[in-house]
Amino acid sequence: MKDSDKIKNSLIDEFYNEAQEKVDENKIYSDEYIEFKSKLNSVSEKMDVLKEDIFDFDIDTLSIIEQGEYIRENKKAKSEFILFILSSTLILSLYVMAIILVGPKILIISQILIATLTPWIVIPIIAMKKRRSEV
Amino acid sequence: MVISNIQLIILLSIVIPILLIQGAWVFRDARRRKEKYYWLWGLFALINTPSNLLIYLLVTRVILNNKSKGSN
């Protein structure tokens, strides 16, 4: 180990109150070691910043995750709703085109069929599913 | 009964927005109630008014509500 390293180590020990031997006083007052000591002091000042309560570690992670999920869900709902509106506009415009091309007969027949048949199809299917899920 | 073209256009211009609003409301409501087939419910409400809306309300508010009460 070089002589300068030895002195630096002993200065570090002295700085942290761990010195076992006395450092040679003549060498300590040389410019190199004064500069080294000022560096140690500045490091100590920087480390003191961590002691101050500037970092707020009291973060509610669960609520942040919940908030993120809520935002993501909202975004997904919005895009699905827009998609639904677009597809329903397309379906209705096709229906209107069919009515205009074929005539109002298709409107009347289709509406009568839908109004009479759907209750007899949808409600029993739902009731059957309900019974199956209860078993 | 014969429907003229003007009558047909007036009828469609009244019915189409109603169907669109009904379908959109059912879609949103089914999604909010966490129904599995909310897309199908939306499309189902889109094809007829008001009987399909009544069926949707009957199924979700009465039939499936009784199911969830029974399971509790």
Image: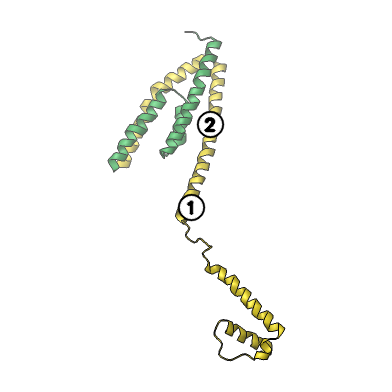
Chain colours: A yellow, B green
Which residue in the rendered view is the most extreme toward the top? Answer: B1
- Numbered circle sitting on residue B71: none
In the displayed structure, B49 sits above or below A25; it is above
Amino acid at circle 1 = Ile
Q: In this view, does A64 lie to the left or right of B59?
A: right
Task: Judge the density around disc 1: few (<14), some (14-19), many (≥20) Cα neighbours within 10 Å.
Answer: few
Q: Which label number is shown at residue A85? A: 2
Q: Residue at x 33, y 41 (%)?
A: A133
What is the secondary structure assignment of the residue under circle 1?
A: helix
Tags 1 and 2 both on a single chain? yes
Question: Position of A32 compared to B16: left or right?
Answer: right
N-terminal-most mark, 1 or 2: 1
In front of the other: label 1 or label 2? 1
Q: In which quarter of the image is the N terminus of chain A?
A: bottom right
Q: Mark 2 lies on which chain?
A: A
Q: Residues within 10 Å of mark 2 (few under 14, many from 20)?
A: some
Q: Which of A131 and A4 is in front in this view?
A: A4
Displayed quadrant of residue A101: top right
At x 43% / y 35%, what residue is drawn? B30
- Tag 1 residue: A64
Q: Can residue A125 be seen in this view?
A: no
- The residue at the point 54 percent across, 21 percent down is A96
Helix, strand or loop at mark 2: helix
- Which residue is drawn at the image coordinates 58% and 82% (left, top)? A15
Quarter residue A26 falls in: bottom right
Q: Where is residue B33 in the image (x, y as percent from the top left)?
A: 40, 38
